[in-house]
């Protein structure tokens, strides 16, 4: 094995370079993964196009201790080619990586809420990730891909795990009605996570194309909405309220809409990210005892195996996976992601 590999390294605002990089070294509990595929998501797009937000270019990350140009990519799958002395059994295995590294010792880790670890960091954001020929990862965040599932199908396990985590936290039960505000990538993954739960899903979005995708994922009714639609417009269009409303759009004013569409005693699950202050008259959710809930990332040991199970038949992956770019063409892939010209999850790599 040569000492160097190719990698897509973020150096700064819109400064992603495909360059030679040393092959990572591994510790006793780590594995070296030959990357097959790495998916791109909105977080990567923001790091690239809005200037490093999470990537620690200027100041060392408090937990990863890493600072400087960083190999992006936190949604990767591949084959373990080398393993530290405590984790030799991983060699040769095909794995999906959770990317979020947790310490195992803090209060939240002990509650199995590893996504909230006080020493948390993410490969591909706070340390080198999977947009490279090789990546090093702790073995305990790598989940073996079951026989019969290809690496390409498994490539969307990590973002699907995020949807599964949200659904788990919302406590969706059989027979519930579920509304989805926003049918983009997160919304689609929420639909997949809801698939076997026996719920009725109604999805709303401003894009007809996105609604077409989720209508193939078990959504029984889709509603095309105007981007300036008011709370009352939405109430009229939905015509009823739901036990659980997933707000995945992150659009301004969306929280008030999600709350208004939640039935008495129901749950509004907030997944979309929006940094502008939002208005909400709280007497309404209080008087109707609505649970306002949030969710972030996923719990690797629970959510990634379930994601792989849901992907097993290959059908979901074929609906949600978009074009595959070579690592050398990563910049073109980011441009496609930013322009919204590609439909489905963009992957980098090849088997
Ligand atoms: Zn992602
Ligand atoms: Zn921890």
Image (spheres, rainbow, N blue to C red):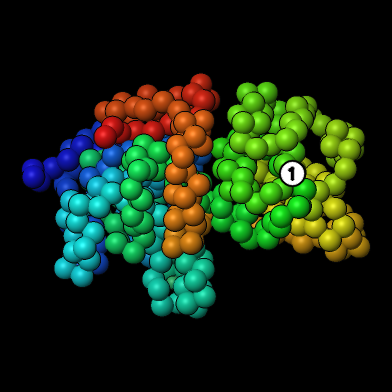
Could you tell me if residue 45 is visible in this image? no
Seen at 80% across and 44% down, the residue is: 257
Q: Is residue 265 left or right of residue 200?
A: right
- Does any portion of residue 209 appear in the rendered image? yes
Image point 8% across, 45% down: which residue? 1
Q: Quadrant of residue 27?
A: bottom left
State which quadrant residue 40 falls in. top left
Badge 1, how many Cα within 10 Å: few under 14, some, many 20+? some
| Circle 1 SS class | strand
Residue denoted by label 1:
200
In the displayed structure, does residue 294 sit left or right of residue 237?
Answer: left
The residue at the point 8 percent across, 43 percent down is 2
The residue depicted at 33 percent of the width and 48 percent of the height is 147
Q: Is residue 258 above or below residue 30?
A: above
Rendered view: 117 above or below 149: below
Image coords of residue 90 (percent x, y): 23, 59
Against 318, is 31 above or below? below
Q: Quick check: which quadrant has ligand 2?
A: bottom left
């Amino acid at each position: 094995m040569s000492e160097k590999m190719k990698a897509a390294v973020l150096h700064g605002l819109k400064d992603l370079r495909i360059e030679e990089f040393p092959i990572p070294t591994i510790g006793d509990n780590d594995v070296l993964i030959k990357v097959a595929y790495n998916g791109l998501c909105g977080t990567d797009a923001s790091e690239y196009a809005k200037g490093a937000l999470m990537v620690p270019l200027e100041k060392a990350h408090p937990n990863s201790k890493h600072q400087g140009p960083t190999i992006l990519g936190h949604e990767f799958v591949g084959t373990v080619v080398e393993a530290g002395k405590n984790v030799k059994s991983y060699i040769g295995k095909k794995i999906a990586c959770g990317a979020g590294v947790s310490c195992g010792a803090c209060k939240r880790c002990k509650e199995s809420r590893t996504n909230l670890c006080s020493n948390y960091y993410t490969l591909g954001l706070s340390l080198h990730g999977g947009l490279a020929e090789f990546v090093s990862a702790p073995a305990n965040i790598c989940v073996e891909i079951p026989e019969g599932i290809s690496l390409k199908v498994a490539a969307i396990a990590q973002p699907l795990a995020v949807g599964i985590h949200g659904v788990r936290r919302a406590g969706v039960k059989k027979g519930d009605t579920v509304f989805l505000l926003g049918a983009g990538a997160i919304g689609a993954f929420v639909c997949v996570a809801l698939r076997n739960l026996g719920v009725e899903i109604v999805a709303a979005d401003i894009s007809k194309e996105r609604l077409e995708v989720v209508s193939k994922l078990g959504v029984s009714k889709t509603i095309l909405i105007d981007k300036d639609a008011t709370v009352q417009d939405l109430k009229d269009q939905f015509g009823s309220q739901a036990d659980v409303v997933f707000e995945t759009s992150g659009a301004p004013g969306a929280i008030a809409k999600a709350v208004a569409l939640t039935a008495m005693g129901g749950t509004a699950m907030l997944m979309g990210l929006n940094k502008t202050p939002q208005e909400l008259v709280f007497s309404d959710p209080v008087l109707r005892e609505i649970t306002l809930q949030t969710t972030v990332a996923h719990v690797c040991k629970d959510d990634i195996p379930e994601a792989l199970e849901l992907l097993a038949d290959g059908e979901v992956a074929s609906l949600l996976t978009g074009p595959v770019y070579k690592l050398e063409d990563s910049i073109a892939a980011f441009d496609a992601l930013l322009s919204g010209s590609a439909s489905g999850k963009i992957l980098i790599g090849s088997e």
